[in-house]
Image (tube, rainbow, N blue to C red):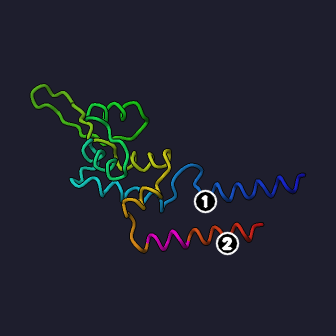
Amino acid sequence: GKVARERLRAVLYRKAARLGYGELSDFGSKVAASIFKRFDPDKSGGMDFDEFAAMSRELGELAPADSAEYKKSLSSSDVHLKTEEHVDPNTHMKRVKVMGVSVEGFVARYARKGSLGTDAALLGCGSLDDQIQLISSMQLELDADAAGR
């Protein structure tokens, strides 16, 4: 009855806190950012079509057919973009150039899409220290779950 519901609620709150309520943990965000940096060799802060296509191919995913398809997919999804503003010296009009997905948008993509662990393993991202930290944190979570039973 009531005790079982309270125990279930406590377990769900603990699990939700560890998972970040649908957001990536700090560790997950760092791993996603390291994947982004790997595929942003020009360090523009925006993953353009060519960079995104290279990442997709390395992950064995179907890349967008061309730059137009990539830009269309960006505009149709709620993703944070890296932009640059330029002011035309003759007309004084401001122009905004989309550089691609920002690192924030890329991290948020993994929060929605999932598969960060799989992609990181396929790409060999994360240092040995990162992998040890991940294994240790997983062991602590398992220990906490076992103790909470």
What type is the residue that disc 1 sits on? Arg
Instruction: Give the number of marks.
Output: 2
The label number, if any, that marks residue 18 in the structure image: 1
**What segment is highlighted magenta in the picture?**
130-136
In the picture, the quarter occupied by the C terminus is bottom right
* Number of the front mark, 1 or 2: 2
In the image: residue 79, left or right of residue 21 = left
Dot 2, how many residues are within 10 Å of its Cα: few (below 14), some (14-19), or many (20+)?
Answer: few
Dot 1, how many residues are within 10 Å of its Cα: few (below 14), some (14-19), or many (20+)?
Answer: some
Q: Is 146 drawn above or below residue 6 in the view shown?
A: below
Instruction: State which tag comes first along the sequence, 1 or 2.
Output: 1
Which residue is at 23% across, 37% downward? 85
Q: Secondary structure at mark 1?
A: helix
State which quadrant residue 73 falls in: top left
Residue, disc 2: 143
In the image: residue 19, left or right of residue 14 = left
